[in-house]
Image (cartoon, rainbow, N blue to C red):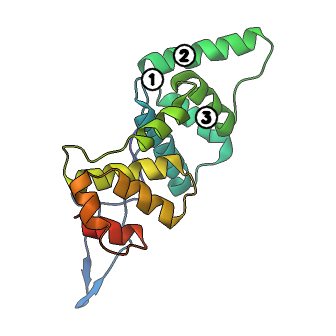
Amino acid sequence: MGNVYEGVGYRDAYGEQPRCQGHGREESHEYRMKIDLPSFNGHLQIEDFLDWVMEVERFFDYMSIRKDRKVKLVAYKFKGGASAWWEKLQISRARQGKGPVTSWLKMKRLLKARFLPPDFEQRLFQQYQECRQGGQTVQAYVDDFYRLSARNDLMETEGQQVARFIGGQPVAIQDKVFMHPIFTLKEAVSLAT
């Protein structure tokens, strides 16, 4: 499919249409954005793969892609090992008398089964459990903590997240932070910083 432009007409280097001058007044045009469906070669780490899937779904949503086109569009963007796997899967399904995969949900399940380790959820949880500030900056720890919290989606209460966040900091910071009443993760992050 290549690069996709929403709308037509000239765009500047930032993807915006220039404002037109007409009879002494400025007419504004709607902002246009260039987006492209991301390719996939089969060689991504767990979080990179999950990010790729989310980016594909955001592309589908933004571009209002019809259900019957999604699988073909994604398959078109496969490269290397992912492309070879997909072709072999299609041939295998045909030999078994099965029809081609036409649903993005089915394709996504097959992709996860092939390109994610079976224990990927446990690995992400383990990373969250072991998330510590260690030698990194507080901001780097905060970024890791928020990322892993979102990846695991454990439905923790605010208090549980505060305890987990504080528990991952060096003892010297923990001691100082515990001297203050903390009710929200935002407060804990602010005190740690």
For disc 3, the marked residue is 108
Q: Give amino acid for label 3.
A: Lys
Q: Give amino acid for label 1.
A: Gly
Horizontal and vertical percent position of residue 19:
26, 75
Which comes sooner in the sequence, label 1 or label 3? 1
- Per the image, label 1 sits on a secondary structure element best described as loop
Which comes sooner in the sequence, label 3 or label 2? 2
167 w.r.t. 185: above or below: above
> Does residue 92 appear to the left or right of 4 in the view shown?
right
The reply to whether discs 1 and 2 touch (Cβ–Cβ < 8 Å) is yes
- Determine which quarter of the picture holds residue 162: bottom left
- Per the image, label 2 sits on a secondary structure element best described as helix
Residue 114 visible in the snapshot: yes
Quarter of the rendering occupied by the C terminus: bottom left
For disc 1, the marked residue is 42
Horizontal and vertical percent position of residue 184:
42, 71
Horizontal and vertical percent position of residue 90:
65, 17
- Residue displayed at 23% across by 59% down: 173
Q: Give amino acid for label 2.
A: Trp
Toward the viewer: 1 or 149? 149
